Amino acid sequence: MFDGDPLPGQGKSNPPNRDVVLGSSEKHVDSNNLATFNNVKVPMADWNRLIDKNYFVTINVFSAREAAENNLLDCDDPLDRRIDTFSGKTIEVRCGLIGERHEPAK
């Protein structure tokens, strides 16, 4: 999900998101467990309402919950950072089932 803080007078209350919601993009991982987000665009009208163009990116990771009711994931950061930390980079997100130990990403 992409969102950010508004210019004065440009916000709308969107809890739990920030006031300027720029949209989202959903991808499935490939055979190498990679999800690639290329050429994702945000609406210019919304982008122009941002006080800081280095907007926030929130990563949500979902498992195949329909396969097992308790198949819920516990993931490490980077789940909520600014776009400049992601742009042009490969970011590792490590997850494990809730209650299982997993090694954090380096």
Image (tube, rainbow, N blue to C red):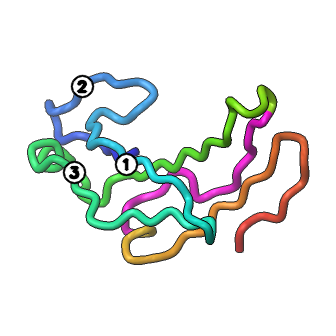
Foreground of the two, 5 or 21: 21
Q: Secondary structure at mark 1?
A: loop
Is residue 28 placed above or below 66 in the rendered structure?
Answer: below
Q: Secondary structure at mark 2?
A: loop
Q: Which of pointers 3 and 2 lies earlier in the amino acid sequence?
A: 2
The residue at 64%/61% (across/down) is 93
Q: Is residue 83 magenta?
A: yes
In the picture, measured across the screen, residue 5 lies left or right of residue 100, that is left
Quadrant containing the C terminus is bottom right
Percent from the top left, x then y, of residue 89?
A: 45, 76
Is residue 66 placed above or below 31 in the rendered structure?
Answer: above
The residue at 30%/33% (across/down) is 19
The residue at 41%/59% (across/down) is 82
Residue located beneath label 3 in the image: 42
How crowded pointer 1 is (Cα within 10 Å; few <14, some 14-19, many 20+) is rated as few
Which dot marks residue 12?
A: 2
State the extent of the magenta-drawn residues as a range: 71-84
Q: Which three-letter amino acid code belongs to the residue tagged 1?
A: Ser
Q: Secondary structure at mark 3?
A: loop
Percent from the top left, x then y, of residue 17?
A: 40, 33
Percent from the top left, x then y, of residue 70?
A: 81, 30
Q: Which three-letter amino acid code belongs to the residue tagged 3?
A: Val
Foreground of the two, 20 or 89: 89
Foreground of the two, 67 or 73: 67
Q: Distance of mark 2 from mark 1, alpha carbons?
A: 21 Å
Residue located beneath label 1 in the image: 25
